[in-house]
Amino acid sequence: MSDNVLKTLQQLVQDVIAPDVREQKVRLESMDKRTDLRFEQVDKRFDMLEQKMDTQFQAIMAAIRESRAQVELNNVRLIAALSERVAVLEAQRP
């Protein structure tokens, strides 16, 4: 009788539980693939965002360098004009 019960349990496992386990395994593998795909998409978006931020940062740094160059040029012009005035004043001194 115990052999019959074991065979019945074995048959039950093979007929009912094993297909469910296989189905769950297939579903889990499918979910893993979808999750991997989503993470790849997110990674691509972050890469694009990082590239965009790098480009914007480079543009900002270029604008800062240009601004500094303009300030330095204005300072040189101002100093040159003041130097000329000082030279004129010194030349007028007795």
Image: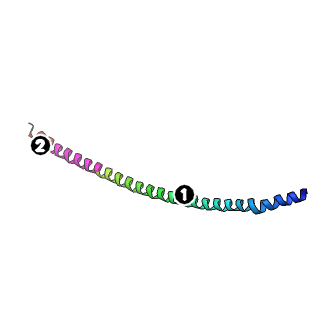
Q: Mark 2 Cα within 10 Å, few/some/many (few <14, many 20+)? A: few
Residue at image coords 20%, 44%: 79
Of circles 1 and 2, which is in front? 1
Apparent side of residue 57 relative to residue 80 in the rendered image (left or right): right
Q: Nearer the viewer, residue 51 or 41?
A: 41
Q: Amino acid at mark 1?
A: Phe
Please tell me the numbered disc located at residue 6.
none
Q: Secondary structure at mark 2?
A: helix
Q: Is residue 83 above or below residue 41?
A: above
Magenta residues: mostly which secondary structure? Answer: helix
Most extreme residue toward the front, as rendered?
A: 1
The total number of labels drawn is 2
Residue at 44% over, 56% down: 49
Disc 1: CA contacts within 10 A as few (<14), some (14-19) or many (>=20) = few
In magenta, the rendered stretch is: 67-84
Q: Which residue is mark 1?
A: 39
Camera-side residue: 8 or 51? 8
Left or right: 73 as drawn, with respect to 92? right
Residue at 64% across, 61% down: 27
Q: Nearer the viewer, residue 57 or 43?
A: 43
Give the secondary structure at mark 1.
Answer: helix
Q: Amino acid at mark 2?
A: Val
Q: Which residue is mark 2?
A: 88
Q: In the image, is 41 to the left or to the right of 70?
A: right
Residue in the picture at 50% in, 57% down: 42
What's the distance in space between the residues labelled 1 and 2, CA to CA?
73 Å
Could you say which is closer to the camera, residue 89 or residue 2?
2
Residue 74 location (% of width, % of height)? 22, 48
Contact (Cβ within 8 Å) of mark 1 with mark 2: no
Q: Does 79 appear above or below 10?
A: above
Farthest top residue in view: 94
